[in-house]
Image: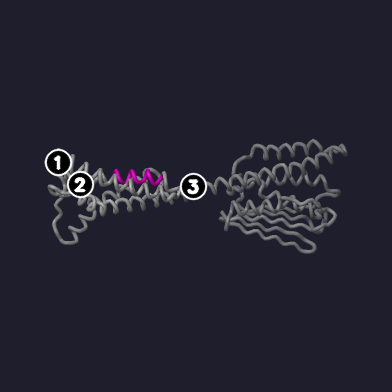
Amino acid sequence: MTKKQRLLLYGICILLFLFGFDLINTLSQGNRVEWNKFFSFYHITTLVYMTATFWLSYKLWNLVWPQRKWLHITGVVVLLYVFFISFRYLLEEVISSLLIGHGNYFTGVTLQYYVSDNLYYASIYIVVGFLLFLLDHQIRLQKEKAAMEVITRNAELDFLRLQVSPHFLFNALNSIYALAYKKAEETPEAILQLSNLMRYVLYEKNAMVDLDQEWDMLQDFISLQAIRLNEPLQLATEKSGGINGFQIPPYLLIAFVENAFKHGILTHKDDPYKLSLSAENDHIRFISENKIGKKNKDHQKGIGLDNIRKRLDLLYPNKHRLVINHTATHFSVDLTIHS
């Protein structure tokens, strides 16, 4: 918990011990509350030694509790007992006698009686102080654990993004090389498209990007990949809904498109590569469907689909649905993401 929350918790506990129980007892018996009794000299001393005991308890437990060494724990308990009894004696028997002419206990009280009587009160404050520390300690551990999980998740996402970026840039460079080797007229346009892709990869470091921006990047990527095909690409795209109002992580959809180019037949006029993106209310839906061709299969193990499954699990736990259908003739991906 924060410092303010800790002070509030301890403050409520101190006020409850100082006034609450006496006030509840008075009211439960139907007696009239005499407020002057609640602000006596000994209420002030009680406030001082109670606050000091809780403060010292918090500091000492912070030092020894993480190591869980019983010798240190025993030492803290003994030290708290000694501190409580001696500090209360100083306030209510020594200083009180000097200021108001008498102590809190009767005249001639023995040290043995004073110690034995205060063991009870000391036990209450020591136990309560320890329980308050444990509550604060557990809350801190939970916050630290949550913060570490966020750091770990972000590090894993960064690692996955680093995998994606050079992966599709490598394929794009292969496409440019194929054009340049044939001295094709499309080479300058392809280089411009590659420039757009590189700008997107190198400078788009936001956790989320506009959905239409990701869609435009896909179109550049498709144009570059189409260069590698021996025949014209047959592509049927559909975009619908309020796409401008949605955001997704960058490079999230490219693995599905890349997979289609690696494993599919995308030049069949009667069975084109189908790509659709729609946005409705609180979700977006992306569908990729292509005819399968052994001839285009890349035998190297790709990182794309495994990568995207991991990213989806990290980014959208219980908020996405990924359905992959693989038949003898077709391969399709149907991804729904809820906001």
Q: Which residues are magenta?
A: 51-62
Of the residues tagged 2 and 1, which is closer to the observer?
1
Look at discs 1 and 3 and give the one toward the viewer. Answer: 1
Q: Nearer the viewer, residue 317 or 3?
A: 3
Q: Earlier in the sequence, mark 2 or mark 1?
A: 2
- Give the residue type that dot 3 points to: Glu
- The x, y position of residue 203, in whole percent, is 64, 37
Quote the CA–CA distance across marks 1 and 3: 49 Å
Q: In this figure, which residue is indicated by the disc labeled 3?
A: 144
In the rendered view, tell whether residue 272 sits above or below residue 166: below
Q: Amino acid at mark 1?
A: Ser
Question: Residue 334's x, y, as percent?
Answer: 68, 58
Nearest-to-viewer mark from 3 and 2: 2
Q: Which label was assigned to residue 97? A: 1
For marks 1 and 3, the one nearer the N-term is 1
Which residue is at a point 80% across and 58% down the rendered structure image? 292
Amino acid tagged 2: His
Residue 141 in percent (x, y) is at: 46, 49
Q: Residues within 10 Å of mark 1 (few under 14, many from 20)?
A: some
Residue at the disc numbered 2 = 43
Q: In this rendered view, identify the residue nearer to me: 152 or 295.
A: 152
Query: How many numbered badges does the structure rendering display?
Result: 3
